Amino acid sequence: MGWNISHRPDADDMCYSATSTHNLGQQIAHVLPARDWRRVRPLFDRRSGDPFTVSARDAGDMARILTASAQHPKMPADWAQDAQQLADSARKAADTRSAWTWR
């Protein structure tokens, strides 16, 4: 199982395996303050593989948090790149005022 995530800035959707998404979440959790992690945790701790959407407003907030995690000095470079890609897609959803879709 994997996630097709909408609003990739340079292509259609981006695809991440469930394992990669979970592992990215663990990396992000290690560098964020608890209040920020609580905000983005629902992206990474899904109890099911059912599709979901994030409102444009929430996507904008998540983009800010994901960017902060990507730029954190303790974030490994390869995980930082993935976190920034998610941040960019969330920002694009927010900027276009459309739902950020994970399916």
Image (cartoon, rainbow, N blue to C red):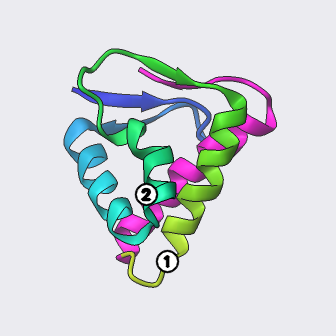
Q: Which mark is residue 72?
A: 1
From mark 1 to mark 2, how far is it between C-alphas?
13 Å
Q: Quadrant of the C terminus?
A: top left
Q: What range is drawn magenta here?
A: 76-103
Q: Secondary structure at mark 1?
A: loop
Q: Is residue 35 visible?
A: yes
Within 10 Å of the Cα at label 2, are there few (<14), some (14-19), or many (20+) other Cα atoms? some
Counting from the top left corner in percent of width and height, residue 66 is at: 54, 57
Q: Is residue 35 above or below residue 97?
A: below
Q: Quadrant of residue 4?
A: top left
Q: Is residue 65 above or below residue 17?
A: below
Taking the spot 65% from the left edge, 56% from the top edge, the residue there is: 64
Taking the spot 80% from the left edge, 31% from the top edge, the residue there is: 96
Magenta segment, prevailing SS (helix, strand or loop): helix
Taking the spot 44% from the left edge, 48% from the top edge, the residue there is: 38
Q: Which mark is residue 82?
A: 2
